[in-house]
Image (cartoon, rainbow, N blue to C red):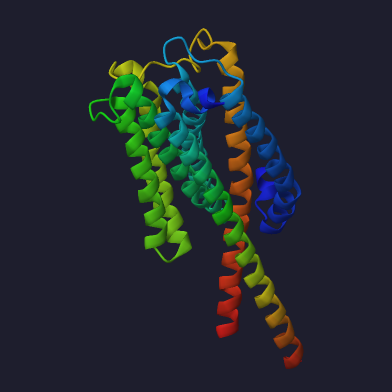
Amino acid sequence: MITFLANPKRFLDFSNAISPWLAGLAAVLLGTGFYWALFATPPDYQQGQTVKIMFVHVPAAYMGIMIFGVMAAASLMGLVFRHPLADVGAKTAAPLGAAFTALALLTGSLWGRPMWGTYWQWGDARLVSELILLFIYLGYIALWNAIDDPVRAAKAAAILCLVGAADLPIIHFSVDWWNTLHQSASIIRLGGPTIDRSFLIPLFIMMAGYTALFGWLWLIRMQTEIFERRARSLMMAKGA
Amino acid sequence: MADFFAMGGYAGFVWPAYIITVIVLIAAIVVSVQAHNSARRSVQRLEEDSGENGESQT
């Protein structure tokens, strides 16, 4: 599968074929998810209506971590197999991951104010490790922009990505290692989720919708990068 | 309806969270699609140009 897609032409054909389906899937899931979350969920017995923020917060946080994991895998493949498509994949996913991470921080702080009494707390390990993830994303994007040669840029960025991936388990386990403000895991935990089904189903629909949206945008951003590289080489050929 | 917008007194937190989310998701779509279209057009233009040049040279 991976070696099959490693050819840019085949990748373009493949992504052209599936990207309209992903876009449609994202539209249906997000439409359903937003409607369900806003109109068809009850208030929580402790959080009242602020529980509605969970439906946009948790999927954003999940995407921020998942995308960085995907980038780390692509970076490793780029380093080992030296294939440009793996580098393109990691590079083009980063701005999307940064956007989701920023959303997780913003929506989390809007929930934190009424429920914890504060928008932000530097002493909380989950909050700070998530902010560090945003900075790693921004550093990664800046590194790509700082180096002109795409081969060298890819190598440096891949190393930064693999080192930065150490933050991912810290984010996940921060709520157990340091029992501070952010509550413990209630979805991905041993023994199954502890959230009521009336919240869990719309939450999963939103997570699936965010994932489909990312998949669609990632494919078209990879295509964009391939087009830009092709345009650059055509211009150089013309100039020569 | 007014009850719904009041969000049990948390309107000032729930609505901004949803509005920011929708803005960022739409912006990500718009930016990605626009960049895609312009990159595709510039490759097409360059390929047509080089095709014409190739023909005139032979």
Assign the C terminus of chain A to one quadrant of the image.
Answer: bottom right
Q: Which of B13 and A137 is in front in this view?
A: B13
Can residue B45 be seen in this snapshot?
yes
Q: In this view, does A10 lie above or below A18?
A: below
Residue A149: x and y, percent? 44, 65
Left or right for A5, reference A180:
right
Q: Which of A30 and A233 is in front in this view?
A: A30
Left or right for A51, reference A32:
left
Going 37% across and 17% down the picture, which residue do you hit?
A183
Residue A139: x and y, percent? 35, 50
Residue A118: x and y, percent? 28, 26
Left or right for A206, reference A154:
right
Q: Residue furthest bottom?
A: B57
Assign the N terminus of chain A to one quadrant of the image.
Answer: top right
Total labels: the figure holds 0
Left or right for B35, reference A4:
left
Q: Is residue A65 above or below residue B28?
A: above
Going 39% across and 26% down the picture, which residue do you hit?
A111
Q: Which residue lies furthest to the front in this view?
A: B2
Q: Which residue lies furthest to the top in this view?
A: A191
Residue A214: x and y, percent? 58, 42
Can residue A240 be seen in this snapshot?
no
Q: Is residue A26 above or below residue A201?
A: below
Q: In this view, does A70 lie above or below A125?
A: below
Going 50% across and 24% down the picture, which residue do you hit?
A52
Q: Nearer the viewer, residue A50 or A190?
A: A50
Q: Nearer the viewer, residue A113 or A232?
A: A113
